[in-house]
Image (tube, helix red, strand yellow):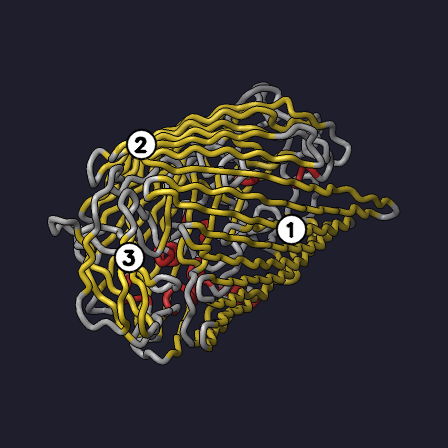
Amino acid sequence: MKLLLTLLFLSTSTIFAQSILKGRVVEKNGKPIYLANVYIEGTYDGSTTDSLGNFTFETNERGAKTIKASVVGRPLYSKPIELPYKELLIIQLQGSENRLQEVSIQAGALQANSSGKNTVMSPLDIVTTAGSMGNIISALATLPGAQVAGENGRLMVHGGDASETQTYINGIRVAQPYTATPNEVPVRGRFSPMLFKGVNFSTGGYSAEFGNALSSILALSTENTIEQPETEVSLSSVGLGLGHTLQWGKNSLTFNSSYTNLKPYSKIITPDIRWTKPYENASGELIYRHQFKKGFLNIYGAYNFENMGLYQSDINYEEPIPLKKKSNNNYANITYSQDLGNRWAFHSGVGIGYLRDKLHYSDIYLPNDEKSLHLKGTIRKTWKNSIKSIWGIEYFDNNYKEEYHRQELAYSYGYHSKMTALFTETTFGLLPNLIGKIGLRGTTSNLQSKKTIEPRASLGYALNKYTQLSLAYGTFHQQAPSSLLKYDPQLGWLAAKHYIANYFYEKSGHLLRLEAYHKTYDNLIKYNSQTAGYDSQYDNNGNGKVKGFDVFYKNTGSVKNLQYWISYSYTDSKRDEANYPHTVTPSYVYKHSLFIVGKYWFASLRSQLSLTNSIVSGRNYNDPNQTTFMNGHTKGYNNLSMSWSFLYSQQKIIHFSVSNVLGASPIYGYQYADRPNTQDIYDRRPIVPTAKRFVFLGYFWTISKNEKNNQLDNL
């Protein structure tokens, strides 16, 4: 395990300052204004107002400064102020000719941020959700529209496969966001949720700023603040971890590292894996921040080394096949934001990734390399409080090479993709309660002869201060996934269109989100062999349609110390792709999925109990012994997970979690033999979890100047 659960409870980032600025933002009649943005000009010191219009934040600024306050739909407030300011600051905002009463566009948008209106989950929610084990991807699976296949652990959205979702950090693409594992063993997301101020997860209809994804964008953003010194130590049943933050002046450097080795764990709880080299992982992340007078520099880096060996079952062989795998996965990005004045802002970034995999499977050796580069620059302008625009340009360079070695046979294949994209998007107020967004994106590639033009549009309408309706439409294109593009680099663009309608209600600790959608696919990849290979023939003659609806309800206000949410998704996906003879429901789609997540804080026991219960329907599979294609159907299953977190002392925590408490035995599908046996029947074996349960026990300790604060205060 990576140092994910360490950051779960122990990351304390309270910024100590020389003075505290408090105040209230109101209308002319004294009515409080919710979510007004209050800040000191030329700095990143600021806050947003609560439902009573109150704000408070700390600053180490001194002397004559300018305090500013803004709300969409109102003129910008500006006033000179002398710091430190000891009195309560009352800010009265004027009305405007086009007031937007907290309208936002909810269609296709799920926010998991540390604060803010319309947030369905916080980073802390992610790591404290039972069954997630601190994995962003597993936690997102409890949200509507998202699915994670048990046998591979990758995120799928609204009936699309895992390749249709792209991951970004601070607006810069991550080419390889998952850890490495053998077949039928689920991967994990590589990144710690507690290093990010929020997770923005789209279920479709996303902004024109992003592209090359048919279904979804997962955008992670780090804090633009200077962290304070502290040290974090963890010991667990699977490894250990260490993190530390240094701070000097306008600079901070945060790193965390972890080491995981499943050898001791496997001796106590034996998985259904015959290890020759139990899974071993060394990983870490680093963030350097520097605050300029009107700008902010953020440097992020992550490394991940994995090593494993095992015997893997295969129905085509009498004995399990020996497998060895080593992986080095490195990623770094640099982003810079600058306030240009007069409501202009500049943001730029560069991201570099390098993945090196070495796979030995029986007498086959498959090494591969992937090098990725992403350059991006954007300009933003607020014309009025009701009109905001963005323009941007970006360049993607992806170089993939794989080699095949078997005895005397050896050959290589791959691709080198170069893409350039231009995009623009404007958000504007149409009526006092109506907001609109129009975007356009164009992309060219050296591998695809045609250019893509992608219009995007969305609307948000506030029925009242608690209820909103949203609509979204968009055209999206994507290159073929690496697993196919490496065999045929000339494959054309895959295409999709999204139509989404959303209802959103939030009041007094109750949040209800309803969403219906329809998605069409064109130019999907098809091939003429049982599995995709070097000698297969490929084309873009596939197509598909997906329709469905999502329901999400969250309650944090009815019972003290209790929060829970219920998430249900109905997904009707029909696709003609791969080697399908006609349109069918793919084997990776659950038609029905239901998640119930609950968390309760026992004050007298200084503990939090978390339970997650998931119920999913069965999935289709193709049985070659039947005449009808994809006519098999697995049984649905129920999975209950729990976790217990105990505050041993103010900064020391013991965490215990168990997945699949009830011992469910799901079958994800079947592997069939390539050839029939002597009775002309294709033999098969079930694809099942490699372990009935996963048990985790950890001890976490934070060392900081403030010896009282910890993340349990926020549970």
CA–CA distance in space, label 3 to label 1:
41 Å
**Nearer to the camera, 46 or 351:** 46
Give the amino acid type for the residue marked by disc 2 in the picture. Answer: Leu
Give the tally of numbered discs. 3
Compared with 419, 290 (above or below) is below
- Residue 590 picture location, percent across and down: 44, 34
Question: Residue at label 1?
Answer: 373
Q: Nearer the viewer, mark 3 or mark 1?
A: 3
Q: Nearer the viewer, mark 3 or mark 2?
A: 3
N-terminal-most mark, 3 or 2: 3
Q: Is residue 78 visible?
A: yes
Q: Earlier in the sequence, mark 3 or mark 1?
A: 3
Q: Amino acid at mark 1?
A: Leu
Mark 1 lies on a secondary structure that is strand
| Label 2 secondary element | strand
Residue 583 versus residue 140 in the image, above or below: above
- Measured in 3D between alpha carbons, the distance from the residue under mark 3 to the one under mark 2, in whole angstroms, is 26 Å
Residue 269, image x, y percentages? 49, 62
Residue occupied by mark 3: 78
Quick check: can you spot residue 694? no
Q: Residue at x 35, y 71 (%)?
A: 15
Determine crowd level at label 1: few under 14, some 14-19, many 20+ residues with C-alpha closer than 10 A. Answer: many
Residue found 55% across the figure and 68% down from its top: 259
**Which label's residue is closer to the chain start, 1 or 2?**
1
Q: Are marks 3 and 1 in contact (CB under 8 Å)?
A: no
The amino acid type, in three-letter code, at marker 3 is: Ser
Looking at the image, which residue sits at the far right? Answer: 408
Element on which disc 3 rests: strand
Q: Position of residue 279 (x, y in %)?
A: 59, 61
Q: Which residue is mark 2?
A: 430
For the C terminus, the quadrant is bottom left
